[in-house]
Image (tube, rainbow, N blue to C red):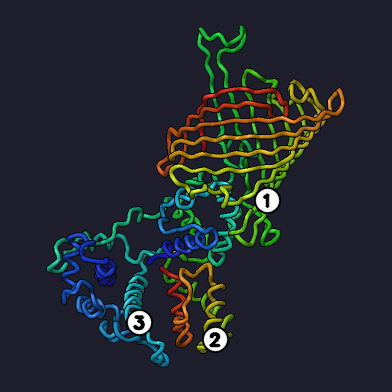
Amino acid sequence: MKRACALLCVTLAIAASAQAAASQDQLAPRDRLILRTLDANGDGTISCEELAAFLDPIVVKTLRAQGIEPRVTSPVSACGARQGPGPAPDATEQRAPDRNYAEFLRELIRSALNSATSVSDSDEAVAPGEIAELTRASLPAPLAGTFGDVLPRTPGANGPAAEVWTDTLEKWVNIRQSFLDEQGIGKPAKISLTDHGQHDETLDAGDPSRVYQVKAAVVMAPQFEWAVSRNVYIRPVAAYEVDISSDAPEKDQIVHRMGISSVILRNDSAAAFSSHLVDLTFDYSTNRGYKASVYGATLQYTPNDRRIGIGQYLAHGALVDFRWRPYVGVVWSHVSDAADVVAYQKQKNFAHEFVRVTGELKVTDRVKVTPEAKLWHADRTTADGELTQWQTLRSLESRVVLSQSSKGVDRASLALTFTDGRDEPAFLNEQTTVLSLAVKF
Amino acid sequence: MSVSDTVLGRVKKLLRVKFEIKTGSASADTALGGPPIGFEASLIKSEFRLRLNEWLADLIPPFPSVSWDEDTTLADAVRESLDSSKIDGIKKIAVYRAHVAALADRAFGAAAGQDAQSVPVASRPAVQEQMNDELEGSLLTDISLADLAGDKPTILSNVADRMII
């Protein structure tokens, strides 16, 4: 039975392939031979009658023996008129012959596939073992070769690999440079090691010659989302951020965040600002020895508007393309214990409002240039009283992808980053150029 | 002629209808961040995920989050959707056909009346519009007026044909 079904499928596949070709010139030599075999009158197409004549009568007989009725008394009659129960349609409801022909093909294939159910939970109709047996069988004259030559090639027919624990972990955990980048053009986490040579004059006496730096965030997103309405979705988030350098413990910034991440969706997906992303977290910041204690909250908003390149490349992913993302937000904090972190020693409370714009210029899949600009407005309570400041930060990162996974996922990249300006919480002037290896999972 | 191809067709229609993307060159191997889609990871994890949840609501429970990013292919998204389906054996074409036939039956009852066994010629445009709206996420091509001719089993068969590759 399965062999008969497979034979029917192969026959129909040959016919459909030849039928689909616009002209014989577009066919491979073997397909032209097949077409000539099927095309009895030589008009370049395969009529229903020609196909029916080619079908092995044994196939139809076997199908019927299994209780499968292809809705016709003979394949030929199916080409010209609709069969089946119910009142006969009037003349205006007659289908076009090509529609009947297509339906006839679909119905036969469907019957054949559905009748062979030896492979459970799959739409593969014939078991791999039966296919292997079929591939060795010779094609009927005048066709040369075996059925294996004309069967479709199906790489991956063994099915997807079972999910491993790292796949599950990937659903729950994200690693990047900053939690606040999650909704944006996510910069990868960075781990860098700088080694100063013996003749390096930039190194002050007594300073360590080898320095490591870690700038990474581990973001946990539980597999739960609360649909407040058809347009508002909220889910909990937790994040652990580390920004430390081995030679500068006074600049430590370790942040623990817990809060919510929400999406507000417009009904009209084509409208401007079709969705809005809002993050609200409560934060506990400290240093590597957990001596400092700073409590606060962060609110950040960013929209999606694909028409102007927010959330989607302007040219939909062309070789050279650009996209960007704006953010607005505010950071409130109360310094409970500054310990030896310089940024916290100078203030008791602060509220930092910011506007941030990031972009990404893509030049092929291997080179990406990421500019970023940030404008801060800071209100602080210091020992000297209230203080208001405006600050800016600009950076430009050029990234060359060194390694990609087999699926083209960026795994390792070399990044050159130029930074100029002041960033919270310390707002010390920074002017650096850093070459680093970036890793993203 | 497979459920994967059919669901891929549904996802491509989502991209066409909701995201205004020309999917002529898109295939199963097309990455969500690559041409002709070009989505950014955050949009994939937020808006695309939510609109896909709604589009495939008859097949899958909503994804609360996804690990998809710009390198995820359409085939990956389809496979994950089918793997998470709430319908037993949905990967079998016969099961999928029975599922969409039930959808078509429900939509037909809502549009033409629960006891209707055919659609009068004069009512067909209205029934056509209502069924096309109701089945927007599962129809691969729109229902035509000719599909609504004949008796109810014929109509449902015609509609189901438009929901399967």
Q: What residue is rendered at 15% in x and 69% in y? A: A140
| As drawn, B21 above or below A54 | above
Q: Quadrant of the C terminus of chain B?
A: bottom left
The residue identified by callout 3 is A96
The label number, if any, that marks residue A237 in the structure image: none
The residue positioned 43% from the left and 35% from the top of the image is A403
Q: Nearer the viewer, mark 2 or mark 1?
A: 2
Chain hosting mark 2: B
Q: Of the numbered discs in the image, which one, if any, rests on residue B123?
A: 2
Chain to which mark 3 belongs: A
Residue A297's quadrant in the figure?
top right
Amino acid type at circle 1 is: Ser
Q: Residue A33, position in %: x, y?
A: 16, 65
Is the residue A369 above or below the residue A127 in the image? above
The amino acid beneath tag 2 is Ser
A82 relative to A39 in the view: left or right: right
| Secondary structure type for disc 2 | helix
A323 or A341: nearer the viewer: A323
Q: What residue is disc 1 on?
A: A262
Q: Residues within 10 Å of mark 3 (few under 14, many from 20)?
A: few
Residue A149 locus on image (x, y percent): 21, 59
For residue A102, above or below residue A311 = below
Which SS class for mark 3?
loop
Label 2: few (<14), some or many (≥20) within 10 Å? few
The x, y position of residue A45, in whole percent, is 23, 73
* Residue at figure coordinates x 16%, y 70% from the top left: A37
Residue A220's quadrant in the figure?
top right
In this rendering, does residue A67 appear at all?
A: no
Query: Nearest the camera: B23 or A252?
Result: B23
Q: Are marks 2 and 1 on the same chain?
A: no
